[in-house]
Amino acid sequence: MKLVILDRDGVINQDSANFIKNPNEWIPITGSLEAIALLNQSGFRVAIATNQSGVSRGLFDMATLNSIHDKMHRELAVVGGRIDAIFYCPHAADEHCHCRKPDTGMLEAIGKRFSVDLKGVPAVGDALRDLQAFANAGCQPILVRTGKGEATLAASMQDSDKALPKNTWICADLAEAAQRIIAEQT
């Protein structure tokens, strides 16, 4: 089975410093839904691994998070795409859970769910913590320049403590990442 792991905010949809708190704030990045559909059509299962500390912070509840994801599923269906599983961490950073990226708990759970060794599994994110989690889980880290991606890349060039994991691919957006993932698998 071929699997791709995606972060959500800043990769699939526009990010917000104030969190995506309701379905109206969930706005897909141009080309991202079509990129997921292309991955699906190329035989990839797609899983999401997303930190959603807004739940723990009381900014939105589980019903609202589910409504946001329902909107994403509906909009993906329109272009022939699908998400096979959504894994999220509802905890704030100070709760020190194992599921919050940069820890690898969500990724390990994805590997178990799909019975897949994560070594080399393409994983796309826009923040250093995404890429660190992906690399630590054995995935192929891919940075997109959307969302926090430009700032992540700039910081990595200015501060060695913020360096990207070794062999990180850098792509303009999810559409470019999908093209490269597909090309690398053939």
Image (cartoon, rainbow, N blue to C red):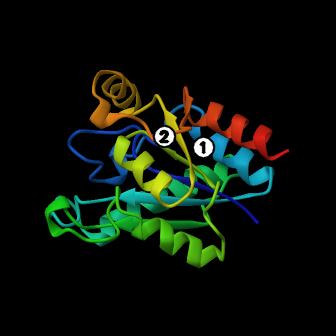
Q: Which mark is residue 167?
A: none
Residue marked by disc 2: 28
Work out whether residue 117 or residue 64 is closer to the camera in this orientation and state it: 117
- Of the residues shown, which amino acid type is indicated by label 2? Pro
The residue at the point 31 percent across, 35 percent down is 162
Which image quarter holds the C terminus? top right
Residue 93 picture quarter: bottom left
Q: Find residue 80 and report its horizontal and vertical position in percent.
A: 72, 51
Q: How many marks?
A: 2
The residue at the point 35 percent across, 22 percent down is 154
Q: Find residue 185 and report its horizontal and vertical position in percent.
A: 79, 47
- Of the residues shown, which amino acid type is indicated by label 1? Leu
The residue at the point 27 percent across, 27 percent down is 159
Q: Which mark is residue 33?
A: 1
Q: Find residue 31 and report its horizontal and vertical position in percent.
A: 60, 33
Which image quarter holds the N terminus? bottom right
Label 2 SS:
loop
In the displayed structure image, the side of residue 78 where residue 185 appears, left or right:
right
In the displayed structure image, the side of residue 68 where residue 160 appears, left or right:
left
In the displayed structure image, the side of residue 54 where residue 39 appears, left or right:
right
Work out whether residue 112 or residue 73 is closer to the camera in this orientation and state it: 112
Label 1 SS:
helix
Check contact, mark 2 vs mark 1: CB within 8 A. Answer: yes
